[in-house]
Amino acid sequence: MEPCCDLQHWEAVLEKIAEDCEKSDRDIDELLVLPVTKGFDYQLVRTAWEFGFRTFGENRVAEYLEKRQALSEHPAASANWHMVGHLQSKKVKKIIGEFDLIHSFDRHSLVDEFNRRQTANDPVQKILLQVNISGENSKYGIEPEKAPALLEAVLNSEHLWPVGLMTMAPWTDDKSVIRKTFAGCRTLRDGLAEKFDIALPELSMGMTNDYQIAIKEDATILRLGRLFFGERD
Ligand SMILES: *Cc1c(COP(=O)(O)O)cnc(C)c1O
């Protein structure tokens, strides 16, 4: 059995996540466990669909479009897809109406590009603001001080709708740093929701290495690749 497609392992991972949730007085049913299928081909998505997953995360537009095409004859074609990776402005026109949620909305030029490309017939695009809480973890994500202006621009655009925040913790073994990052993201979310008087229910935080900490800090979406599917090439 290829490590990617070991269904018993997937069951065990879900049970483990459910236990981790219980320890934090949370219910796995209030979380979206988002399998990130990047780096694996469409056959993995097919197997994961048959297993019961209905929403998948991808981090590159070209790879997503290829898989989507390869799946067109399969029920998995009707899956929900989330874009979790950095989104180049020039790719926006290719993904209008494709993703149920974009996690990586991190700059004003994306607002402009969506406004330019979306038509009245296109569904409203739900997005998460990706924020760079720790200031060091990544070149992507907007600085927390600049998040209010970006959120305002999103709210002013007709076809975009913000539903929460996404962040990535720095690569470190220091759990307190990771925890502070996730807690900072939640605090920022709470402040923005109050300032703009809107609901921002979603917190996309936690990957294979740090999802247990994210659960403790009220994550609502866990983005998990290697935990389910093993190492990517
Ligand atoms: C690849 C990826 C993930 C999943 O990472 P794992 O460490 O494999 O769980 C989550 N979020 C983003 C943005 C990714 O690119």
Image (spheres, helix red, strand yellow):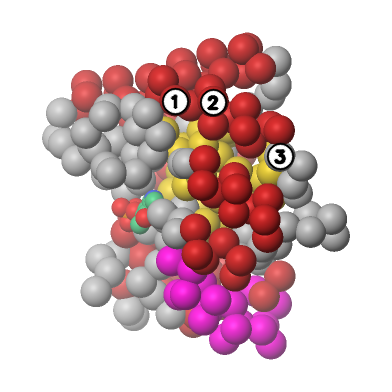
Residue at 58% in and 29% down: 151
Sooner in the amino-acid sequence: mark 3 or mark 1: 1
The residue lying at 71 percent from left, 39 percent from top is: 157
Q: Distance of mark 2 from mark 3, alpha carbons?
A: 13 Å
Q: What label does residue 146 carry, if any? A: 1
Relative to 146, residue 130 above or below: below
Question: Which image quarter holds the C terminus?
Answer: bottom left
Magenta span of residues: 60-76
Quadrant of residue 73 in the image?
A: bottom right
Residue 116: where, in percent of width, then height?
Answer: 67, 56
Q: Quadrant of the N terminus?
A: bottom left
Q: Main secondary structure of the magenta part?
A: helix
Inspect the magenta stretch and tell me whether residue 200 lies in it: no
Q: Is residue 77 left or right of residue 121?
A: left
Q: Position of residue 96 (x, y in %)?
A: 66, 63
- Name the residue nearer the viewer: 191 or 109: 109
The circle on residue 149 is 2
Which amino acid type corresponds to the residue marked 1 in the rendered image? Lys
